[in-house]
Image: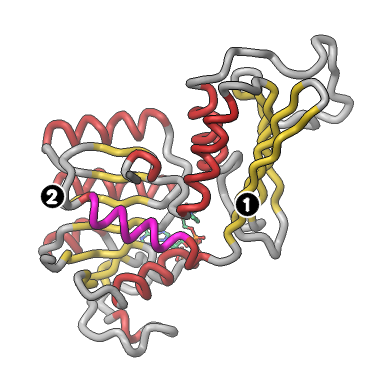
Amino acid sequence: METVKIIIAGPRGRMGSEAVKMVTNTEHFELIAAVDHKHDGHMLSDLEGFHSINNVPIYSSIEKCLQNVESDVLIDLTTPEVGMHHARTALQHNVRPVVGTTGFTKADLEELELICKEKKLGCIIAPNFALGAVLMMKFSQMAAKYFNDIEIIELHHDQKLDAPSGTAVKTAEMMNAVRDFKQQGHPEEKETISGARGADFNGMHIHSVRLPGLIAHQQVLFGSDGQTLSIRHDSYNRASFMSGVKIAVETVMKQDLFVYGLENILE
Ligand code: NAP
């Protein structure tokens, strides 16, 4: 298998540091640079936690990084605005983005899809790289054909910036594609405290829980006469996402199209 040359943006982050471990522990991957806005000109080995990782320069901007190193894939695990800029710039330099950063808008996704088409390049964006979470979404979509009363409860750590989570939105979109429309709850229901019924996604409700101690969890509840069905996935650490990132890097090298969601590349 040919070696894939990889840049990681956000290497000090909770996800980014796991990605550094995964890339450096994978035989056919090579970490050739990192993008970190706070450590320009340093080597990754200068930073706490990375002392054993040699020959990986850090650049403060994606532009500078792409001018100095030749790479195949950019893994972005930063923040939505930064991630969008990184993905767009990478594609313009013929580098394929694998993006785990969440919070991209519909317009962002459409713009990236268009650049991929023009450049005939692959790009994979996945709001959740945990394989179990992808199965949870697929099983939920299967159930939504038969149950159209649905509540999503997503639970994350309290440092998460976006709500609802990208996974919850993606799950709702997938279920919406097969569910018969229904505006749930009593037609005259009133919130005595604003937000009590959560976000409304085409009649379904999404509830976002934020607590220290949590990582990433989601439960999809289905109800009908005399029965409920619960489908739940829990990520207990960030290593749980890395098998999906690895598959995405391998796949993005073989595909010349834009993909949103890991479920679209799993066989
Ligand atoms: P985090 O710990 O806050 O890490 C984000 C990192 O990005 C920080 O180290 C931050 O540095 C860095 N950063 C910010 N601006 C930057 C820039 N201009 N250039 C380079 N680095 C920059 O967050 P996290 O928990 O790792 O999550 C990162 C993203 O992944 C979030 O969007 C999160 O929702 C998403 N996520 C995705 C999945 C998935 O499976 N797809 C799973 C979990 C999380 P400073 O803090 O120094 O600014």
Q: Residue at position x 43%, y 34% from top?
A: 105
Q: Is residue 217 above or below residue 41?
A: above
Q: Which residues are magenta?
A: 241-251
Percent coordinates x, y for residue 239 in the rendering? 48, 67
Magenta-drawn stretch, dominant element (helix, strand or loop) = helix
* Residue 254 as seen in the image, left or right of residue 11: left
Percent coordinates x, y for residue 9 in the rendering? 33, 62
Residue 118: in magenta span: no
Percent coordinates x, y for residue 34 in the rendering? 28, 69
CA gap, disc 2 and disc 1? 36 Å
Provide the residue designation for mark 1. Answer: 217
| Furthest residue toward top | 187
| Whether the residue under disc 2 has CB within 8 Å of ligand 1 | no
Q: Secondary structure at mark 1?
A: strand
Provide the residue designation for mark 2. Answer: 93
Amino acid type, label 1: His
Q: Quadrant of the C terminus?
A: top left
* Residue 238 as seen in the image, left or right of residue 200: left
Q: Residue at position x 17%, y 64% from top?
A: 4
Q: Quadrant of residue 219?
A: top right
N-terminal label among 2 and 1: 2
Q: Nearer the viewer, mark 2 or mark 1?
A: 1
Q: Quadrant of residue 153?
A: top right
Amino acid type, label 2: His
Q: Residue at position x 34%, y 74% from top?
A: 39
Q: Is residue 210 above or below residue 69?
A: above
Query: Quadrant location of ligand 1?
Result: bottom left
Percent coordinates x, y for residue 256 in the rendering? 16, 40
* Residue 99 as seen in the image, left or right of residue 174: left
